[in-house]
Each structure stands twice: as C-alpha cells, then as structure tokens.
Image (tube, rainbow, N blue to C red):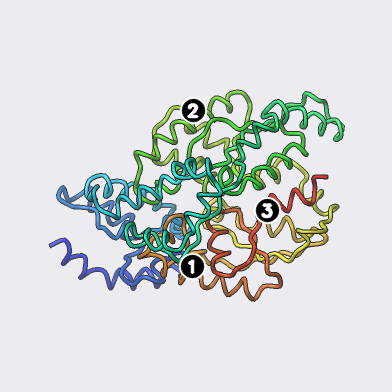
Amino acid sequence: MRQATWRARTPQRRHDERRTIPNRLRPVAEVDDDFPGPKFQGPEQWRLKQTDDDYEIDDSVMSCSNCMRCDNACPSGVPLSQMHNTARGEYVENQMDKLSIEYVRNRILANYRTSATIASKVPSLANWGMNFGPARWLMEKTLGVTKEREFPEFASETFREWWTKRGGADASRRNAQESRERMGLDRDTDKKVAYFHGCYSNFNSPNVGKAMVRVYEHYGYEVVAPEQKCSGTPMFANGMLKDARRHAEVNVSSMSDLVDQGYDAIASCTSCSMALRQEYPELFDIDGIEKVASNTFESLEYLRIHEDIKEDIQAADVSGELAEEFAYHAPCHARNQGLERQSVELFRDLDGVGIEDVGESCSGISGTYGWKEEKYEKSMEIGEEMFEHMEHAEGDVGMTECPTCASQMEHGTGYEIRHPLELLEAALVE
C-alpha cells in the first residue's frame, strides 16, 4: 500500500517542486527523475513518521547527496538537512541489510579516516595499489566503488607528522610572537586558534594545512592541532550516525576544552566547519557542543573578521607558480555558511592573479556520493555545468575550499586545483 501511494503522489510532487525550487538548489532531482526531492525526504516523511506507526523510511533517502542546498532554498527556515540526516540514520539503522554489499561499501566510504590511516603508513604502495587498473575494476565489481575515478594520492608525510617534526604548538608560539613584534604588538598578545585540519588535509593535502599554519602565524596567532577524529560529514551522508557521534564526542571534548582556554576553532575545509557549527548541535546532545559550534569558523572567514586582510591583499602581489588565472567554485557547504563569495571578493584585487566565479552549480561529487558506481554518472551530470563554466573561464587552474569538490573539478576538466589558503600564503608570507 505504501509503495502504491508513493507512486501515485510522486509525479505531482516532483512537478510542484520543480516549479518552486530552481534546479541549482536541488541538484540530484535535476538529473534523477526517480528522486522525489527534499520536500518529500524532509517534511513529508517526517510527518508520516509522526502519524503512522507502521511507516518505514523510503529507500530513496539514500539517494540524497547531503549537499544541503535545500536549507538555502526553504523560505521558512525548515531544517531540511537535519530531517534528511535523521531519516537516513533511521533507515540505515532499522531497515538496511547489514550484510548487503551496499551497506559494507557505504561503511568503508563513510569511515575514510580508517583506511587513510592505514594507507598513510605505506603511501607509495597505497597510491600504486589503489590506482592499479585491475584493483579498481575489482572494487567496482565487488563493492560498487566506481572504477572511473582515480583515488586521491596519500602524502609521503602527513600534516600531523610535519607538525610534530616542526615542533608543534611550541614552535607555533615562537613564530607567532616574532610576528607580533614585527606588527608592533606585545609578544604576549592573546591570539590563538585550534586547527581542525580534518582527514584530507592530514592524509592527502598537507600543503593546505601547512599554508593555514603559516598564514595564521604571519598574523600573530598561536596554532594548536588538538586530538581529533573525522568531522563526520561522510558518515552523515551515508546514515552512519552512531559512527559520526563517536567521532563528534572526541572532537567536541578536545575543542571545548580549548574554547574554555580562549581558543577559537578553525577549519580549512568548509564541510568540516559546517559539521562542527551546524550538524553537530542539530543531531547530537553532547556536553560542550553549543560552545564549540558558536566558536567555529572557516579559515578565511576568521581572518576577514579579525584582520585587515583585504587591505593586505591589495598591497600584495603574487609571482611565480601561483601567478595564475583561477576558476573558482564555491562548495555547497560554503554556500550554506554564507561564504560563497569570500574568495572572489578577497583575491580580485590581488596583483599577479585573476579569479573568476564559475557559477552556482553543484560540483556533483558530494563527498562519497560520486564514488558509488550507481551514482557516478549522475554526479558527472550534476557537475557538467561547472565543468563547462571552468573550461570557458580565462585560466586553466581551479580553486575551491572543499577537497572532494577539488577532486571532481580535476576529474571533469583535468585542471590543477588549489586552495585559497595556498594563494594567501603566496601573497602574504615571505
């Protein structure tokens, strides 16, 4: 009966949603006619769960990519993404076959930090093995992980290994004090931040983490890198809420202690900052969670609030490797935080570079979504508008704050992709 009702109501629901919500704000529904869209996945399923004791979550909830654009689209401020995450968690916990290939695959993808920790011990071997053609074919046939994508390379030295070798917080304090003297400030001025580097900046792109540390020290901030787990973003997207909570408990515990000591939490990945400042307090009741959420910032956002960074950029110039024309893509999770224009506004006055916004389209990869064999083509269709805009932009170097968006941008265009912090370091740090 439920399936019959679902089929009867879907066409009108899809028609109404397409009439009222622009395509760019519902990217999965744009390319998948069977996906009912955020209004059904959120409020309607929520209502049915409250009024029908026998109602089961529709399995289409697993097709939601967790881009969270529906939060922007809703004029009434309904917490749609929270409803989707809750429903997805209930579906996985109560209805999904734990022995199914889909569940095993999703659990592996959601817990990227676990596999990355192992791979980082033997990065050269891991890089070869993960991108060995027959191995990728086998992963697609056995686990449903698409063979079309190359796995991101693991760094020969993780960010935390570099951080420890460099001298950790003690070295950062000394560097910050030297910068304060250069700036005419007291050496003991209270400027300190706790860096939530996340998984990708630790295992795959430590250059982003290094740039973040150097830029913040340039402005006189002492940086600490506390104990941390995954932000939980890939777990939310796959309905693994118990896993996400275990990681959140560690992150909130370490970050809340530092907030009490006067630190603010800084993330260089917009999905990580989104998790700490929005998804954690929406989904979990953990001591200190509101305190952490209200003191979490994206890395450029924090500098724009507290420093004369725009004036410094206007007085700077870039030469050499990063003197490029950049095609900038704002991640969906940056848009949810109101940060979609900050890099364009910041760098358009920087001598030696150009930056062009490539539009409002979603990249399509949405973390683990585009890694699933059955979702790969849809993810590429979603990203097609972004690819086209990038290829028509002046330059052939991309820029974004999100590591998985960067992966999709590179995959779809062949362009090299850089993080705004890398350009900021090149402009400001000698």
Task: Give the CA separation, mark 3 to mark 1.
Answer: 24 Å
- Dot 1 lies on which element? helix
Which residue in the structure is indicated by mark 2? 253
Task: Give the CA separation, mark 1 to mark 2.
Answer: 37 Å
Give the farthest residue toward the left. 1
- Mark 3: few/some/many CA within 10 Å (<14, 14-19, 20+): many
Q: Which mark is residue 420?
A: 3
Which of the 4 image quarters holds residue 3?
bottom left
Q: Amino acid at mark 3?
A: Pro
- Dot 3 lies on which element? helix
Q: Nearer the viewer, residue 124 or 298?
A: 124
Viewer-nearest of labels 1 and 2?
2
Q: Amino acid at mark 2?
A: Ser
Sequence-first tag of 3 and 1: 1
Question: Where residue 152 sits: x, y (%)?
Answer: 53, 55
Contact? badges 3 and 2 (CB < 8 Å) = no
Is 335 displayed left or right of 40 in the figure? right
Q: Which mark is residue 24?
A: 1
Question: Where residue 55 sits: x, y (%)?
Answer: 18, 52
